[in-house]
Image (spheres, grey):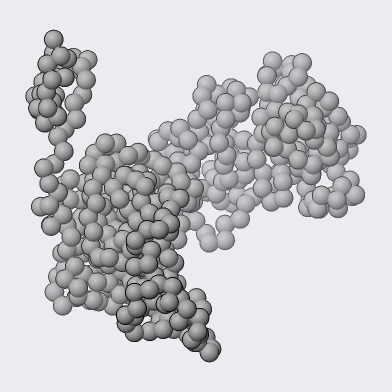
């Protein structure tokens, strides 16, 4: 009967009935949504004064002076508006244009070209927010990257010249300083970890240079990796974010900053409800470092890692495809000094489980320099705990060299059932595949299309340097390791393959 009654109600009455009807005891019933705020006006009014517009100028040649035109849909009424706006503000023809005919305007430009290019300035527009009344402003690094001059415009149109305190391109964050006549309104960082999918959020910024603009939406997803960098962990929101919103804040309903709006996913260049923000929990650490040191001091472990796939997990005796598989260890790096080995699977870092490989670079980067951290690794069927001292990531961190192997010879081996041929490294093959003089192993000389080797991404010129964490220097040693694996009843092993300057682990089935 209840369903029939609700079906006959108006939308407002339906919502009221849903909210007023308690869920059955024990939590077995449905969870009704909280009602939408009646208005965001009071919250927006209190937050707008702390959000700023940022313009940066950079010396440019005349032919490259115009900022990028927003990608409006064909025939959009805004297209001509922005053409005229950029013409009047960026020097083509100069001054006010009273002609409403766009085609004639284009003809005039062609009839009166500038004789010679001359240096002037290219302008970039973005957003930011004040975190300290003394004049500390946060924005994205890409908003001010390469700028010769940075100007911050407050909500009351006061303009202040800004100096760059520090920036970091990997996190895409920058901290600016302005010198106001009086304390400025500031906002505070909130707890981004507490933000749940479905929570209401406000985005405030400077889209397309129009000035302070408020949009509302919800947290659409957490932990998004959009392939922008090694530390991707974005909050996704459907609050409208457009070009010019970069560097602006994403607020929760308490008025705290839980994200810094950084990127959008859009085929048109305008908002389609896919915006991405750096979580405040991560941004706070970097911003504090930029204020103190002028740069981000990232923690460093000194390993190259790859994803643990189900095949790899099975070959190592792991129950699940969790953790980060170590593919290289940097000589004399923190991991090397802690006795981490090539082929170890890092399961936890400082007690935090690593369900995905990409979690490790981020949590290591956020760890204080010189901190002692327990590292749980899986090695040859056993779980070990190592103590690692996190170091600061050097600017010129280089991968560790390939492990040395004993000098032995062996003949060519053809794995007909797996589509692979391997051979000892001769002088001719070393020259043909441009292999390093010190590299030892078994070189792949042929891969059959659609075979197992091809499906695993192997190519001629790749060099097998380890099998199941044992160094190999010839095809015969590869065969011996595979035979040992068969005797142990293993269904698959891991082979370490070097291609150029990189190495990776490849799961390899053991044929009986």
Q: Quadrant of residue 194?
A: top left
Q: Quadrant of the N terminus?
A: top left
Q: Along the horizontal axis of the image, is 84 left or right of 47?
A: right
Can residue 286 be seen in the rendering of this structure? no
In the rendered image of this protein, does residue 134 appear above or below residue 285?
Answer: below
Q: List x then y, in percent, for residue 314.
A: 60, 23
Nearer the observer, 223 or 40: 40
Q: Quadrant of the C terminus?
A: top right
Q: List x then y, in percent, for residue 179.
A: 23, 76
Q: List x then y, in percent, for residue 485.
A: 72, 21
Nearer the observer, 139 or 83: 83
In the rendered image of this protein, does residue 319 appear above or below residue 396?
Answer: above
Which residue: 57% across, 57% down?
397
Which residue: 80% across, 32% down?
448
Nearer the observer, 128 or 422: 128
Can residue 156 be seen in the rendering of this structure? yes
Q: List x then y, in percent, for residue 494.
A: 67, 30
Q: Along the horizontal axis of the image, is 215 left or right of 343?
A: left
């Amino acid at each position: 009967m209840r369903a029939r009654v609700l079906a006959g109600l108006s939308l407002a009455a339906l919502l009221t009935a849903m909210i007023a009807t308690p869920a059955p005891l024990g939590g077995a019933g449905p969870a009704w949504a909280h009602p939408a705020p009646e208005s965001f006006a009071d919250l927006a009014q209190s937050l707008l004064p702390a959000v700023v517009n940022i313009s940066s100028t950079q010396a440019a040649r005349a032919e490259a002076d115009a900022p990028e035109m927003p990608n409006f849909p064909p025939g959009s009424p805004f297209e001509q508006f922005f053409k005229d706006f950029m013409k009047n503000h960026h020097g083509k023809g100069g001054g006010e244009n009273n002609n409403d005919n766009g085609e004639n305007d284009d003809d005039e430009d062609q009839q009166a070209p500038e004789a010679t290019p001359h240096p002037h300035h290219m302008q970039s527009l973005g957003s930011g927010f004040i975190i300290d009344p003394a004049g500390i402003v946060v924005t994205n690094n890409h908003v001010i990257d390469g700028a010769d001059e940075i100007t911050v415009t407050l909500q009351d149109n006061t303009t202040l010249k800004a100096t760059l305190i520090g920036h970091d391109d990997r996190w895409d964050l920058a901290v600016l300083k302005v010198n106001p006549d009086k304390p400025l309104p500031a906002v505070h960082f909130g707890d981004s970890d507490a933000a749940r999918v479905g929570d209401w959020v406000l985005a405030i910024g400077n889209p397309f240079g129009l000035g302070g603009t408020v949009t509302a939406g919800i947290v659409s997803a957490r932990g998004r990796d959009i392939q922008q960098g090694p530390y991707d962990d974005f909050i996704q929101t459907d609050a409208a974010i457009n070009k010019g919103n970069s560097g602006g804040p994403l607020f929760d309903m308490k008025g705290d900053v839980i994200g810094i709006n950084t990127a959008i996913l859009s085929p048109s260049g305008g908002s389609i409800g896919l915006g991405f923000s750096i979580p405040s929990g991560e941004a706070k650490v970097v911003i504090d470092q930029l204020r103190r040191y002028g740069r981000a001091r990232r923690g460093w472990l000194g390993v190259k890692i790859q994803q643990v796939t189900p095949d790899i997990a099975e070959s190592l005796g792991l129950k699940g495809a969790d953790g980060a598989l170590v593919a290289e260890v940097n000589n004399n790096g923190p991991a090397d000094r802690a006795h981490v080995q090539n082929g170890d699977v890092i399961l936890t870092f400082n007690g935090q489980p690593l369900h995905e490989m990409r979690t490790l670079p981020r949590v290591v980067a956020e760890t204080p320099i010189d901190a002692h951290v327990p590292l749980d690794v899986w090695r040859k069927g056993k779980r070990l705990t190592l103590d690692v001292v996190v170091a600061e990531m050097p600017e010129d961190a280089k991968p560790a060299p390939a492990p040395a192997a004993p000098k032995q010879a062996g003949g060519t081996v053809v794995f007909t059932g797996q589509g692979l041929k391997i051979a000892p490294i001769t002088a001719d093959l070393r020259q043909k595949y441009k292999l390093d003089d010190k590299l030892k192993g078994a070189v792949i000389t042929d891969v059959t299309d659609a075979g197992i080797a091809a499906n695993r991404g192997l190519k001629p010129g790749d060099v097998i340097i380890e099998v199941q964490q044992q160094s190999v220097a010839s095809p015969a040693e590869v065969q011996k390791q595979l035979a040992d694996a068969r005797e142990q009843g293993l269904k698959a092993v891991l082979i370490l393959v070097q291609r150029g300057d990189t190495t990776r682990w490849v799961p390899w089935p053991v044929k009986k």
